[in-house]
Image (spheres, rainbow, N blue to C red):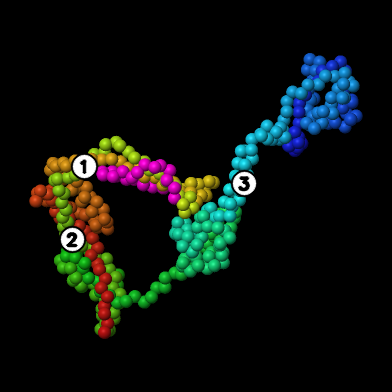
Amino acid sequence: MLKIIHWIIGYVKFWASGALPEKFMNLVAHSGINIWDIKSKNGTFSACVLANEYKCLRPLAKKGNIKIRLKEKHGLPFILNKYRGRWGIVIGLFLFYAVLKIFACFIWVVDVKGNNEISSEQIKIVMEDVGLKGGILKSKLDIPLLQQRAMINLQDVSWLSINLNGCIAEVSIKERVKEPELVTEEKPCNIRAKCDAQIDSIEAYRGEAVVSNGDAVVEGQLLVSGVVEDVNGCNTIQHADARVMAYTKRKIYDEVEFNQIRRIYTGKVVNRRSMKLFNIEMPLTFVPTPKNNYSVESGKKDVKIYNRCLPLTIFYQKFSEYVEENIVLTEREAMEKLEEKFCTREETEFKDIQVLNKKPRYFIHNNKYCADIVYYCKENIAQEEEIILE
C-alpha cells in the first residue's frame, strides 16, 4: 500500500557521496524527511525520497558536506508532466469517457437463464417482439409491462422476471410443469390390414382374431374384431389391439437422366463481410455482389465476451465461381447414382420394416436409366379403424 501511495505522490531516487554520510543521515532524520531503500556501495549510497521533499535535502547536504545527484524519477506526476502538452490525449480520454457514458444508457445484451425445454433463441425473439432487445434505451423500458407481454406470448412459462445489470438485461424464467395427459376411455375399434399380405403370426391382445397364420389378406380386410362374444352369448365392443406380422411385397421406381450438368469450380473466390451493431448494418468490405455463375456460402458470427453475446454480429458471404459442363453418364455411373437414391429412400420408407429380399430391374427409357425394385418384406400390417356406433 505504501508503494502505491509513493507512486501516486511521486518520488525520486538520488545518489549521495561525501566524507561524513552519517552526519547527513542524522540531519535528514532530525528534519522529519523520510527516505527509504537506502543502499551503500563504494563510498556512496543511494536512497529514495518524495519528489516534493527532494529540494529540502540540498541545504542539509551542504551542511553535512555531502554531494547529492538526482538519478531516477518515478510516479504519476512525472507521467502526467510528460504528456501535459499533448491535448489530443486529454480530449481522447474525455471522448472515451463520454462514449462509455452514452453506451451505458443502452441495453447491450439480453441474457436468458432458467430455460431447459424452451430454446434461448425463441425467448429472445419473443422479448424482441415485446420491445426488449439490444440497442434500446434503458429509460424507455417499462419492466412490469414487458414481463406481462412476454408471459402472454410464452405459454410454457410459469414465471418470468427482467433484471437490469448494467448494460445487460437478464431474463430469468421458470418453465411450466406440463400436466400429465389423462387417460380417457378408449374408443372401440377393429384391426384391419393396411396392405395386401400373407399372415405370418398374429398376437391379439384385445379383441377376437378372425384370420389365422398363413392366411392371405387384402388391404382393408378385417383381422381382429372389436366385437367380442362372451360365454353368455352377449356381445361387447372393445378397443381391439393386436400385432399382426405378415409377408408383404412393395415396389418402388426411380430414374436418372444420362445427360447431366456438372459444376467445375475455377478457384476464383470473392468474400464479402458486413457487421450489425444494435440495429445498424455497416459493410466491412466494399466488393460488389458478383453475378453470373457463383455459388454462395453465407453465415454469421456473434461477438462474445466472457461467453456473453454482444450486440455485434459479423456476417460473411463466400462466392465461388464455377462453370457448367454438359456430361453424359455411362450406364455404370447412372446405376451408381440410382443406387444412392434407392439407399436414401430405403432409410426413410423402410424404417420400421424388415426387408427379406429385393429384386431390382434396370432398363433404359427416354434417355433415362430407370429401375424398379420389388421388396419382399416382413412387417406389422395392423391398422386401427374406429367402430362408429349409431
Q: Residue at x 86, y 22 (%)?
A: 61
Q: Which residue is mark 2?
A: 248
Q: Residue at x 73, y 28 (%)?
A: 73
Say if residue 388 shows up in the picture: yes
Label 3: how many Cα within 10 Å (few below 14, some 14–19, many 20+): few
Cα separation, mark 3 vs mark 2, equals: 78 Å
Question: Label 3 is placed on what type of residue?
Answer: Tyr
Q: Which residue is mark 3?
A: 97
x, y (%) of residue 226? 26, 76
Residue 194 position (above or below residue 134): below
Residue 167 position (above or below residue 18): below
x, y (%) of residue 116? 48, 58
Q: Which residue is mark 1?
A: 324
Q: Which residues are magenta?
A: 281-300
**The residue tagged with tag 2: helix, strand or loop?**
strand
* Image depth: mark 3 or mark 2 in front: 3
Question: Label 1 is placed on what type of residue?
Answer: Glu
Question: Label 2 is placed on what type of residue?
Answer: Thr
Name the disc covering residue 267, or none: none
Residue 352 position (above or below residue 285): below
